[in-house]
Amino acid sequence: MGHIDAAAQAAPTQPDAATAAPPASATLTGPESEETIHQRIGQLTRTLHDALRELGYDRELMDARDNLPDARDRLAYIARVTGEAAEKVLNAVDRARSVQQELTEQVGDLRQRWQAVAAFAAGGKACTPAGKQLIDETCDFFGSIGGQTDRTNAILTDIMMAQDFHDLTGQVIRRVVVLAQGLEEQLLKLLIETTPPAQRPRLEAKHLEGPVVSPVARNDVVADQQGVDDLLASLGF
Amino acid sequence: MNGDIRFLIVDDFSTMRRILRNLLKEIGFGNAEEAEDGAVALSMLKTTKFDFVVSDINMPNMNGFELLKNVRSDEALKSIPFLMVTAEAKKDDIVQAAQAGASGYIVKPFTKATLEEKVQKILTKQN
């Protein structure tokens, strides 16, 4: 059974005159009717809250609200860390491309020189048969390097393209964060509006265990390794 | 090869800007600059000559649709090719882009071949 069903069952079964629903045929017009509707919504909200409190769900609502900021921070952390990982991969791809380019140029230069040697040795006078065979095989090998670097570059392109996951997942995370923010605001309003002022609990954020995703505004964590080193130094380590 | 064609890549994700820049270079378009949202892009377009815009849709400050509308309503910019490259695959968005004057529309994730095909098609059509 869902929470809404349970709450409905726990709600007062004898509605008073103010909360009783009007007949289906009743029509309300003008500012007075608008006020009546607002009053009724307020009373329904109160009834809902009473039901939630009786069932102990107000505490759950508050817990849910308390955990949402941390959930948002964690999502933002995921977006940031995956973005950094993608950038690292792209940097590595760039470096690998540079190495490949260098290799291609060096091979091209050597191949030309060996081809000149091969042409000189073609008459068989300046080179033994085994030497000539070695020269030919070396020239063939240098010739094949170009195709291999092309294949490597194609693989590097595939690796680069795979990093678009950061953009795609980042957009999803951003939307979930917006949804969570809206939900958090609604929960907070519900809690504030339906709880007597004297009984309003302190709405403090709680922090779950795990990597520190948002060190700002927290004084119980360090932001980076420098913070760790500074702290250890202050303790004499 | 096509270094005289100057591209403006607009995307709020630096990873995607970098991927697009590298891909364009691989397919022969090595002249490209980047902007992180539509507002920055519009400012760059008004001060520097670009021949081709490749833009995302969902961005802060000014999204791709707004950028496209601004470009198409500006006498000096209205004929510039404008390719949408976005994760938005909703038909409404694609129709909206076409109606607003987009020259092409690519849905992420995409391949190098797709980008090359769309860019070449737009350039051929323009010429």
Image: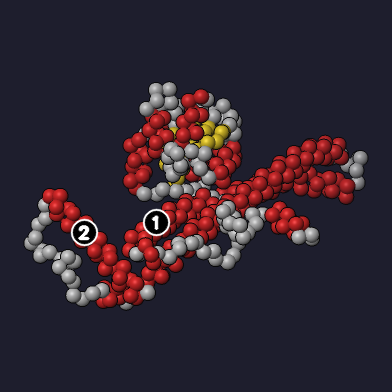
Q: Nearer the viewer, mark 2 or mark 1?
A: 2
User: Would you name the residue on which mark 1 appears?
Assistant: A185
Q: In the drawing, does residue A214 fall left or right of residue B54?
A: right
Give the residue displayed 21% in from the left and 76% down from the top.
Answer: A13
Q: Which is more toward the observer, A219 or A179? A: A219
Q: Which is more toward the observer, A75 or B76? A: A75
- The location of residue B69, given as percent across then percent down, is 38, 33
User: Would you name the residue on which mark 2 appears?
Assistant: A39
Give the residue displayed 88% in from the left and 42% down from the top.
Answer: A124
Q: Which is more toward the observer, B5 or B49? A: B49
Give the residue displayed 40% in from the left and 25% down from the top.
Answer: B74
Give the residue displayed 50% in from the left and 54% down from the top.
Answer: A169
Q: Which is more toward the observer, B17 or A141? A: B17
- The location of residue A22, given as percent across then percent down, is 12, 64
Query: What scheme was used to colour the molecule?
Result: secondary structure
Three-letter code, disc 2: Gln
Parent chain of label 1: A
* Mark 2 crowd level (few <14, some 14–19, many ≥20, 10 Å Cα): some
Three-letter code, disc 1: Glu
Q: In the drawing, does residue A98 fall left or right of residue B33?
A: right
Parent chain of label 2: A
Same chain check for tags 2 and 1: yes
- The location of residue A148, given as percent across then percent down, is 69, 48
Labelled disc at residue A7: none
Please identify the quadrant where the C terminus of chain A is shown. Answer: bottom right
> Eyeballing the image, is A96 above or below B67?
below
Q: Secondary structure at mark 2?
A: helix
> Eyeballing the image, is B13 above or below B1?
below
Please identify the quadrant where the N terminus of chain A is shown. Answer: bottom left
The reply to whether residue B2 is in sight is: yes
Sequence order check, earlier mark of 2 and 1? 2
